[in-house]
Amino acid sequence: MERLIASGPIIIEDGCLLVTRDWKDEFYKIPGGRLEEGEDLESCALRRFRIETGFDADIIEELSTMYLDKKPVTGEDIEMELHHFNAKLKERPTDLEGFEHADYEVKWLNVRDIIEGKFNVAPNIKFLIEKGEIEPWIDYSFGKKKKFFEFVDMITSRDKVAIVTHTDPDGLISGVLLDKILKAKSVSVDSINFIEMEAEMVKKITSKLKEKGISKVFFCDLGVDNADLEGLEEMKKEMDFFILDHHPSQENPALKDNMIKSTSDDCAAMLVYDLGRGVFDTKESNWLLAAAMFADYSYQTSKNFEIIKRIYPNVTKENLGGSTPGINARKINSAMRYYLDNLHHVYELVKNRDLDKLSEVHNIIEEEVNCLVDNFSDNAEFISEKGLYLYEVKSSFRLSSTVSSIISKMGNKGTFIVYQKWSDGVHLSARNQEGLRYDMNKLLKEGIEGLEGASGGGHAKAAGAGFKEADLALVLDRIKNNSMFDIKGVY
């Protein structure tokens, strides 16, 4: 019986898999080929890859091996070993269009399209998808990985670098993962900054960064392009920036070299994690990825839930809240509420995976949250014809976002508006788990429109806003009378 040993590299860029096809192939395949005498598997993979595509690549790690006893096309008996390696291109392509090289068609196939059966592909591609080693991960709605790494590669030892990220678990975790990428690329981070999404947020942080001599800035999980475009234009005069985000906004061609956006369903941590694959050992950060996906509702799409399930096989949609990723997310969130004025401390605890110290403050916050949730039924205002709940949180900790997330998942359908008066104004969180008829992002933007010093936004299912206490009655009145609640017969 014929015996064949072959190897090939897996190259994924921006959610697309690099494949080839020649005149005799019935399907797209991983570029690779037969091992020659005296050759090792990695050299074989790179040699065949160069022959079929014209590209050079670097091997990152070995993936699963597929064993076959039949040839895929002819069905002939054979002993076949197909070895695979996760790899990256030495030179990133200018685009992801297909082309011809030698006798091969070279093409980039969207991994999600492969999974949905839109292309005829070789059995080993399907095998690696089943193993979770070829994944769609995230959808890039705007921007390219190439531009991010070009930006990073421009940073010199003379630059001072800052990470500016959001004050929630997804923002904090995104910052930790980005820090790991920069460290692996020999870039030191001089300043970590946590800011709310608010009016003129870029303008405010620019003055602080300028005082520190910052020359390069990374924004994580902040809709700065939508909330403070004028501030970005002013920042550009003082320092260079790159945006990593998932908040919905209109495409801005002026930011094509300075921003990557994933879709709203894919949290910012997923985006940064994807950038880090092949740069640092992302497997060690799987616990963080899963926590961010839980905290930011990314698990609600089927493909994202499967990512969490590969990390934690025993997780189900029913037990997710009490599972390891759910508990880790709540511990991080609790620490961020407890140390609201010292988020750098929480950042270090998460970075060092100090779960014991996170647990200490989590127990304190959890007790407070449980009391507020228990009081919801007796103290919330409910407008039945609109399915609208309004609830004021009174606590020495800022917990409106945490409480709104919990009560919106307790079984009652509807829109949940939870607000809390704080020293800097009112913090309001909106949740609606359906996310189809009711858009919380739109609801809150219309609720605060034209109000001085007000800001807000988010996603269809979850959004937040901040405004002056004097405007509270007006904002609540606008929410109650929003036209999206005119749809009858929903609840």
Image (spheres, grey):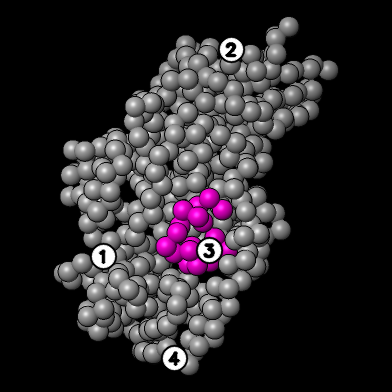
Which element is circle 3 on? helix
Q: Which residues are magenta?
A: 331-349
Apparent side of residue 219 relative to residue 77 in the rendered image (left or right): left
Quote the CA–CA distance across marks 4 and 2.
Answer: 69 Å
> Closer to the observer: label 3 or label 4?
3
Question: The N terminus appears in which quarter of the rendering?
Answer: top right
Tag 1: amino acid: Ser
* Separation of marks 4 and 1 at Cα, in angstroms: 27 Å
Amino acid tagged 4: Asn
The reply to whether dot 2 and dot 1 touch (C-beta < 8 Å) is no
**Compared to 97, does 1 lie above or below?**
above
Q: CA distance from mark 2 to mark 1?
A: 55 Å
Foreground mark, 2 or 1, reads 1
Q: Which residue is mark 2?
A: 47
Mark nearer the viewer, 2 or 3: 3
Q: Is residue 68 above or below residue 172?
A: above
Looking at the rendered image, the disc whose residue lies closer to the viewer, 3 or 1, is 3
CB within 8 Å, label 3 to label 4: no
Query: Which residue is more in the foreground, 40 or 154?
Result: 154
Circle 4: element type: helix
Quadrant showing the C terminus: bottom left
Tell me what residue is drawn at x 22 percent, y 51 percent: 203
The dominant secondary structure in magenta is helix
**Residue 342 magenta-drawn?**
yes
Q: Which residue is mark 4?
A: 379
Identify the mark nearer the N-term, 3 or 4.
3
Q: Tell me the CA gap for discs 2 and 3.
A: 51 Å
Residue 406 shows in this picture: yes
Q: Residue furthest top?
A: 38
